Image (cartoon, coloured by chain):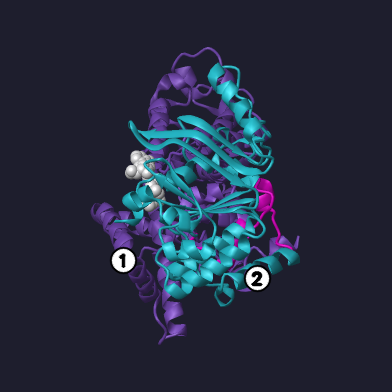
Amino acid sequence: MTRLFRIQSKAGWAAFVVIFGIALVAVPWLNLMIPVDSPYHLPDYMVSLLGKYLCYALLALSLDLVWGYAGALSLGHGAFFALGGYCMGMHLMRQIGTRGVYGNADLPDFMVFLNWKELPWYWFGFDHFAFAMVMVVLVPGVLAFVFGWFAFRSRITGVYFSIITQAMLFAFMLAFFRNEMGFGGNNGLTDFKDLLGYDLHDQSTRVGLYVASVVLLACGFLIGRFISSSKLGRVLVAIRDAESRVRFLGYSVTNAKLFAFTISAVLAGLAGALYVPQVGIINPSEFSPANSIEVAVWVAVGGRGTLFGAILGAFAINGAKSYFTGAAPEIWLFFLGALFIGVTLLMPKGILGLASGLAARLKRPPAATPQQETALVAGREHA
Amino acid sequence: MPDADTVPAAAAPAPANKSRGRNTRVSEAKARLAANTILYVDGVTVAFDGFRALNELSLFIEKGELRTIIGPNGAGKTTMMDVVTGKTRPDKGDVLFDEGSVDLTRLDEAAIANLGIGRKFQKPTVFEHLTVFENLELALKTDRRILATLLFRLGAAQARRIDETMGLIGLGDRRSARAGTLSHGQKQWLEIGMLLMQEPQLLLLDEPVAGMTDHETEATAEMLLDIARERSVIVVEHDMEFVRRLGAKVTVLHEGSVLAEGSIDYVQNDARVIEVYLGR
Ligand SMILES: Nc1ncnc2c1ncn2[C@@H]1O[C@H](COP(=O)(O)OP(=O)(O)OP(=O)(O)O)[C@@H](O)[C@H]1O
Ligand SMILES: [Mg+2]
């Protein structure tokens, strides 16, 4: 038990409780309890928007676990997110029942439209919420395990790993665009009615989903901290620094990476599953390569290998995106590109790295800066 | 999941599909094995695109022995270590460990490390983003499986051992320093400290004093002599002063095979050794 408390410092726990406490209490309160005409009232759309950001933050956090710690930049994490989302979407489709346009209790509308006579076998079971939840975990998890097993065992690293994860993602996108796959083709799954009996259009349901997102992100963060603060977390950092050296210490690099990759995929899948009922649709565009690359930008901007940086980056960029696409949609993509280049060149450790660097400089002004120290060491190496 | 420490204690017999010639050679070899070898390398050839980095190399290291290996650049010294530690598979030949009881050519790096073979690389490689203490902690001999590593808790006795080792390698006051901020010599020592934490039976050191000052070199020599009291050690070095200081048996490699072997005085006076190595 004490191990659980020691996954972060006292200050870390204080910050954790304050931030997630505010997110958990203040948002629902400002939305539901403050009268609509008060300036402090939080509009309904903001709750859904924040819920969406929370799912993105969990996706970013999951990527940070494999990229920031183990050093394997996956550009296919959108696939795990989308698969989790599709599992949830399939359950929501089955919940529609006879309320669809065709009023068919046995088949979703898009299958009736395609003249299908019976439900494909892989849709069975999704009537049940528990079954769907198991699939939300299992589908991304098993995919990551099998894919990772082949990739890591063959010692595919660096940019090659990024490329094959992107290729996997692309293959999924093409497959899900096809109507014959039975996942609604390019329209995807939508027109959801309710979840566990709660109407998805009720504001109280939306607040409930928001709260679930906060709790899930908090759990994801603690799981990430548990791993990163363990000796296995240090093995992952060691793999990032000098992979082959870790092998000569007797650790299985393959198994360590496989563990991180699989856990990460499960977290991404859970994020996708909570995302879908909040945005009301899941379609193959979630598999688009650009989306997955953007997740890497969130993590880089926030600060890699910190977990909290990933959350920060996801909120900062998506917040900026929401603002720009409203205020000046034509410059958003340029802004994102410029931001990424700027961060890569000027702040390699992201916003968090910049902040802690400034804090350190304030604490000990006259001492040698880290850059000077490394320069000294490097100089000696070349001598 | 394949597990590194459930290594089959493969007795050296060659599998049935190997040629008869090899079969007899292994058993003959086993007969020749003194009860005492920790490492048995026989007839090992490694070719890179036709170029033979190792050419019918044979080398026998006794239990508890300290051996120095010298030779010109490209003689195959590092490649020999690659073969022993599983990084490179030999095209031909036997590499047996612990009185011939384990065939190293069939194991991967992690399995070999867990058998008790530690290695220091020519270019010092420590984990730059971890502290000195954490580097040593990772090397500490423990259960290497994933779950055990995730749930690992450092015991008081283990923490004391790490502290002791830190003192031994002269980094007692750099406990929480990131390894990336250490000097070149300090990194070399940290790597040696990591090897000690692994409690290996056989230690392979590739140019441990490269880039060190005279003072550091002398300190390292003392440290190695101390270390070699409890285990077998193979040291590759170019620094002849250092090799003399170790006072151990010397093997000279040249073009992938042994050119001469004996005491430092013997090899230094060998005409061929002078020609290919010392004379230049
Ligand atoms: N992976 C490889 N591919 C191709 N050639 C290689 C490879 N590894 C080593 N060689 C070659 O094999 C030969 C032996 O190299 P090795 O590194 O073992 O020499 P060494 O005795 O350690 O030399 P040094 O004293 O410079 O460290 C060299 O000619 C080298 O270029
Ligand atoms: Mg070498």
Q: Nearer the viewer, residue B93 or A278?
A: B93
On the rendered structure, is A143 left or right of B77? right
Q: Nearer the viewer, residue B155 or B141?
A: B141
Q: Colour of chain A?
A: purple
Local SS, label 2: helix
Q: Which residue is mark 1?
A: A346
Residue B218 bears which disc, if any? none
In front: label 1 or label 2: 2
- x, y percent for residue B170: 56, 73
Residue B129 magenta-highlighted: yes
Q: Position of residue A31 (x, y in %)?
A: 55, 61
Q: Which residues are magenta?
A: B127-155
Asked if the magenta segment contains residue A133, the reply would be no
| Mark 1 Cα-neighbour bin, 10 Å: few <14, some 14–19, many ≥20 | few
Q: State the residue position of label 2.
A: B163
Mark 2: give few (<14), some (14-19) or many (20+) Cα within 10 Å: some
Q: CA distance from mark 1 to mark 2?
A: 38 Å
Q: Amino acid at mark 1?
A: Leu
| A357 displayed left or right of B33 | left
Q: Amino acid at mark 2?
A: Asp
Q: Is residue B80 visible?
A: yes
At horizontal 62% and vertical 62% (from top left) the residue drawn is B227
Give the residue drawn at x 36%, y 50%: B271
Q: Which one of the lettered chains is coloured cyan?
A: B
**Residue A76 percent location from the top left of the image:** 43, 40
Q: Quadrant of ligand 1?
A: top left
Q: Position of residue B159 (x, y in %)?
A: 69, 67
